[in-house]
Image (cartoon, grey):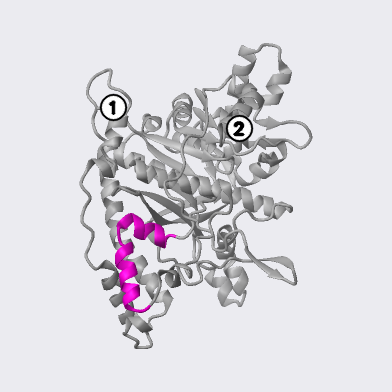
Amino acid sequence: MTTKTALRGRSGTASPPRRKAPHAVEAALAMHMVRRPDGVSDPKQAPPEVWLRAAAAACMGLLEQRWARTQADDRELLTRKRSGARARPGPRRIHYLSMEFLMGRALTNALDALGLDDEFRARLAAAGRTPGEAVEIERDMAVGNGGLGRLAACFLDSFAALGLPSFGYGVRYEYGMFAQRIRDGQQVEEPDDWLRDGNPWELPRPELRYEIGFGGRVDNDAGTRRWVPAIAVRANAYDFIVPGHGTERVSTLRQWHASASHPIDFALFCRGQHLQAGRENIEADVLNWVLYPDDSTPAGRELRLKQEYFLVSASLQDIVRRHMAEHGRLDNFGDKNVVHLNDTHPALAPAELMRLLHDVHGLDWDTAWAQVQRATSYTNHTLMPEALEHWPLQMVKGLLPRHLEIIFEINHRFLEQVRARFPGDDALASRVSLIDESGERRLRMAALSIVASHRVNGVSQLHSDLMVRTMAGVASSTACTSWCPRRATGASARR
């Protein structure tokens, strides 16, 4: 059976749909009415918030069942033994890393995918209410802002509809980018406190926690480089289930929320130094606050870089953990996984994956790098030089000293390939180097993404064609095997 056939057989069209639980909305509504502190038990008197949460609870019960079946099916497919020396490569799980996902409201999408919209409308009508009363009070997930985030959300919809094993990875921002208010004819930006009343669509995963380090030093341990971070925060997982349409399959958006690795400093607290006692908690929480913090100050730029590494490290630790649980070895990592970079925000992923494979798990450099290139792919969203991320080397060294060493080694080997293929062309080597040596030395994140990838694309055919012409020098000496146009769109219009 070919990979395409195997995946096609997993879609909803290949198996009879399972029956949904009868009266799911009614049962969830009754549960929420019992919980009301004011003693109101008549659904006709229930405010729209109760209807919204009841509908979400009804949906989540079914979505969790679909999620569990999807994960079991994926494990079976990805660990299935393939016979024959000439067996074609098997399917891979897609991991879509993005700093933002513009998911939109979840209620109408979930009701439609689960076939609960008719019951929802009927229950509302019986109570003398309209669907709009509940739908319009749902707050948007403030974890995405523009086209980059909308594209990421569309892909999760498509992964679910097509039955592809997949996870999206992002950050669980507390206040989004900003909430817009108009005062005296002027725009005023305020925090978008979208989690103020909780999020009925997310599933905390307390069993999934990872330590994320910053700063520190790199030690030489019997010839092996070991990073000893100065500080660490904890990444905590929250899942948002993305339903497929016309199928029982779902995808998952796993979002990371930072917390302090240690509780408060009790000695400082007892001495009355309360703010200092909780300094680690505040420093960790800042990572969660805002999508795209203002980078016009050194502190803002450092926060952005820390957020990007926080996303990358937590996600890759989770991916490696899952891979080891399923396969027990890492020299086949690239045969089982795709790590897709949605623009350059997750571009530290190749360096972090090299650290995990080489430093932590002991793969030799060449084997680890082969797995990184086999797994990594990259979508570029802009060709404007001023919009491409460039990080000062001193900042990278201060926050991620081992990663900078790894990037230097990647660049050294890459430039050796360039000079071997284009001898004497020092201008080309300077132009395609991962390090910009003009003025303050800076790390070119787009170049790192391309060098580490086996697939690169723009967001349209025209964009991809322009990329080939403007970035061809970088690609000429890489393992990137294809520059391809964007082909997929979302299965759901959402909002």
- The numbered mark, 1 or 2, whose residue comes first in the sequence reads 1
Q: As drawn, is 184 to the left or to the right of 91?
A: right
Q: Is residue 78 above or below residue 420?
A: below
Q: Are marks 1 and 2 in contact (CB under 8 Å)?
A: no
Magenta stretch holds residue 126? yes
Q: As drawn, is 126 to the left or to the right of 334?
A: left
Which label is found at residue 21? Answer: none
Q: Is residue 295 above or below residue 135?
A: above
For image coordinates 35% across by 49% down, the residue present is 244
For image coordinates 49% across by 62% down, the residue present is 262
Identify residue type, mark 2. Answer: His
Q: Residues within 10 Å of mark 2 (few under 14, many from 20)?
A: some
Q: Which residue is mark 2?
A: 463
The magenta-colored residue range is 106-128
Residue 400: which quarter of the image?
Answer: top right
Q: Nearer the viewer, residue 368 or 23?
A: 23
Q: Which residue is mark 1?
A: 2
Q: Position of residue 227 (x, y in %)?
A: 54, 42
Q: Residues within 10 Å of mark 1 (few under 14, many from 20)?
A: few
Q: Is residue 386 visible?
A: yes
Q: Position of residue 274 (x, y in %)?
A: 60, 74
Magenta stretch holds residue 37? no
Q: Is residue 129 above or below residue 307?
A: below
Q: Main secondary structure of the magenta part?
A: helix
Give how far apart the Cα atoms at labels 1 and 2 are.
32 Å
Q: Is residue 206 visible?
A: no
Q: Secondary structure under badge 1?
A: loop
